[in-house]
Amino acid sequence: MMEALDKQAIEILKDNDRGSYTVPTAGLYPYQWNWDSAFAALGFATFDVPRAWREIESLFSAQWDNGMVPHIVFHQPDDGYFPGPDVWQGKGPIASSGISQPPLVASFARKIHQRDPELGMEKLKTLFPALVNWHRWYMDCRAESGVVASSHPWESGRDNAPDWDEASEAIDISNVGEYKRRDTSHVDASMRPTKLDYDRYLALLYFGRDCGWNETEIADNSPFRVGDPTLHFTLLRGHRDLAEIGRMLGEDVSEIEGWIATLEAACQKLWNPEMSAFDSVNLRNGKFANSLSNASFLCWYAGIESPEMVEHLERYLANGHYLVPSYDPSGDKYDAKRYWRGPVWAIMNAMIGWGLEEQGHVTLARAVRQQTAGLIANYGFAEYFNPDDGTPAGGGHFTWTAAVWLSWSLSDLAGG
Ligand code: DGY
C-alpha cells in the first residue's frame, strides 16, 4: 500500500508539472505559486534533483528588481482563475502578482542540496544573491517594526485565517464593484473564503496596484498591516538557512546574522500573554488577533522554544483532534471545513514536525508525522483535511500534499 502511495504521489507531481514549474492543482490553481513551488521542489528532489532546481529557477525568473519574489507567476494565460495578470499588473520581468508569500526556498534549497551536493553547490552559488535580495526585500519592506508584516492575507498564505478578521474591518470595500469568482466553480463554497473576504482581498489588491506597488505607500497607508507568525517564523528560519548556505559558499554573512538577531528579538511582539501563545498582531492598532493558528506552532521551525506552545499541542492531542488544526477547535471561529479556519494542512504539519524534531520534542514530532501520514493514506492527497474526522477538503490531486508525502518519507510509517 505504501509503495502504491509513493507512486501516486510521484504521479501527482508529474501530472501537475508544466515543464519548468508545477501547478498546485489543475483547475483551481493553474499557475505557479511561490510556497507551493518550494514544496514541489522538495518533492521532485526525492526522484529528480535537476527538476527540483528547475522549479526554483522558474520561480526566481519572476523576481522583481526590488528583490521581491511574487506569490503567483502567470507563465501561461488561463481563464479558470481570478484575479489574473490583467488585474494584478505586477512590475516584474514576467507577469506576476504584486505581493510575496512565505519565504521557504532558502530552507528547502538546503535540503535539496543534500540530495546531490555537487549539483547543489553549483545551483546555490547562482541562487544565493537572488535569495539574499529577496530576504533583504522582506527586511526593508515588511519588517519596519521588527515583526514581519503581511500586507495582504494572500501574502501570509493563510488566506481566510481568523487572524485577519479584526484588521480587515478597516478595509474599505465600497469601490470593489462586480467580479466573478472562479474558485467556487472548482471547490464547494463552504470550503472557501466568503464573499466579504474576497471583496477585501480585491480592495487591498487594488490599493497596491493603484499606487504602482510602491512599498513605501503600502507600508505607510495601506489599511492592512498585520504581524504574522507564518511570515515571521519562516523568514527567521529562512535567514538561518541562508546564513548556512552563505558560510558554505565562503560568503560574508554578517548582514544576514543581523537580520536573525532582529527577528529573534521581535518574536516577543507576537507573544500574546492572554492566550499564552504566539499570535498575529494588527500593526495599525497593536491589537492581538487572539487566534491560536497552526502558524503559531512554527516557533520550533524558527528555532524558538516555548513550553506553553508544547502544552497547547498536547491539549489538541488529548482532545482527539487530528494535528494540527489551522485554528483552535475550542475557539469561537472554528470551522472544520473552511480553508484556514480549522482544517489541517500537511505542509504546515511538515514544518511544525521538522521544528519539533530539531528541538528534541520527539514524541510530539512523531505524533504530527504519524497523523499526517494517516490522513493522507486514508483520505488521499487533498489540499486540507477536517480535524474532527479527517474528511478531505478543498482541491484534490494536490502537489504540495504529494510533496510532503515524498519528502517527509511518510511511507516509512508502518500502518499509515
Ligand atoms: C487563492 O486564489 O485562493 C490563493 O490562495 C491566492 O493566493
Image (tube, grey):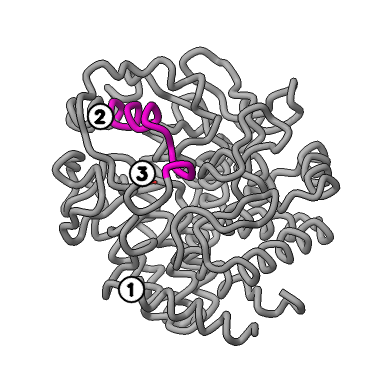
Circle 3: residue type: Ser
Label 3, label 1: how many angstroms apart (C-alpha)? 22 Å
Q: Are marks 3 and 2 in contact (CB under 8 Å)?
A: no
Give the dominant element type of the magenta stretch: helix, strand or loop. Answer: helix
* Disc 3 to disc 1: CB gap under 8 Å: no
Residue 308 at x, y percent in the picture: 80, 36
Q: Earlier in the sequence, mark 1 or mark 2?
A: 1
Q: Residue at x 40, y 23 (%)?
A: 224
SS for dot 2: helix
Residue 177 marker: none
Image quarter of the N terminus: bottom right
Per the rendered image, the range of residues in magenta is: 189-204
The residue that label 2 is drawn on is 208
Which residue, given by chain and number where applicable, does mark 3 sit on?
A: 100
Q: Position of residue 108 (x, y in %)?
A: 50, 63
Residue 250 shows in the view: no
Residue 202 sits inside the magenta stretch: yes
Tell me the kind of residue under disc 2.
Gly
> In the drawing, does residue 99 fall left or right of residue 330?
left
Residue 145 versus residue 187 in the image, above or below: above
Question: Mark 2 or mark 3, which is nearer the start of the sequence?
Answer: 3
**Residue labelled with disc 1:** 17
Q: Are marks 1 and 2 in contact (CB under 8 Å)?
A: no
